[in-house]
Image (cartoon, rainbow, N blue to C red):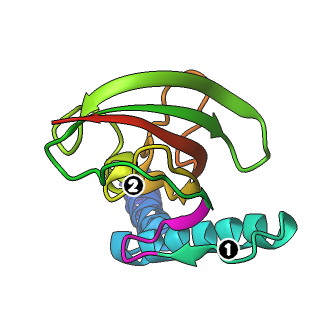
Amino acid sequence: MGVKKLIYSVLLISLFSCAERAESTVNSINLDPVERQRMYLAQERQILQGYIDQHQLEGIERNGYGMYELSISEGDGLTSEMGDRIIYSATVYLMDDSGVGQYTDTVDLGMSEMEIGLHEALSGMKEGEKKLVLIPSFLARGLAGDLDKVPPQSPLRYDLRLIQIVR
């Protein structure tokens, strides 16, 4: 009987000690998802502001979406609106100035499958206009990046030129 009591005691002690350790581990890892997102967005704003300061982008302005826009040259044609078919060119960079790509595309503004931030940046541009846009990750390629050249949660720089509006 003494051996059985000893074994039961050891089992009970080990069960309670494991349960206590498991709880403390879970509590230390648990972070409110909303707070985590706030922290990430604040960190990303600092990255964007650091890029602006490093490149001395005088006159760049933050819009209501959290993107930063700087007009490089004014256009003289029609002004783009959501629903317009547009032809534009873009050169895309990461915040370390490494190039992601350069392309020309035709899209239906506000209806095509491209980054939300890009739709917003192109809306209101005039034909011939050029501008630099810094787009936070949640409006660019998002959480996963593009699984190729754009890492997860990467803000991007776009050098845009609106070539033509087709109505």
Crowding near the residue tagged with mark 1, few <14, some 14–19, many ≥20 C-alpha atoms within 10 Å: few
Horizontal side, residue 78 vs residue 31: left or right: left
Residue depicted at 59% across the width and 72% down the height: 45
Q: CA distance from mark 2 to mark 1?
A: 27 Å
Quarter of the image where one finds residue 6: bottom left
Q: Quadrant of the C terminus?
A: top left
Residue depicted at 57% across the width and 21% down the height: 148
Query: At which x and y percent is residue 78?
Result: 30, 50
Let me know if residue 23 appears in the view: yes
Residue depicted at 62% across the width and 25% down the height: 101
> Do the residues under discs 2 and 1 have CB atoms within 8 angstroms?
no
Q: Amino acid at mark 1?
A: Gln
Q: Nearer the viewer, residue 55 or 41?
A: 55
Horizontal side, residue 116 vs residue 151: left or right: left
69 part of magenta stretch: yes
The residue at which mark 1 appears reads as 46
Query: At which x and y percent is residue 79?
Result: 30, 54
The residue at which mark 2 appears reads as 125
- Dot 1 falls on a residue whose secondary structure is helix
Q: Nearer the viewer, mark 2 or mark 1?
A: 2
Q: Quadrant of the N terminus?
A: bottom left
Q: In the rendered structure, which segment of residues is drawn in magenta?
A: 63-71
Horizontal side, residue 148 vs residue 126: left or right: right
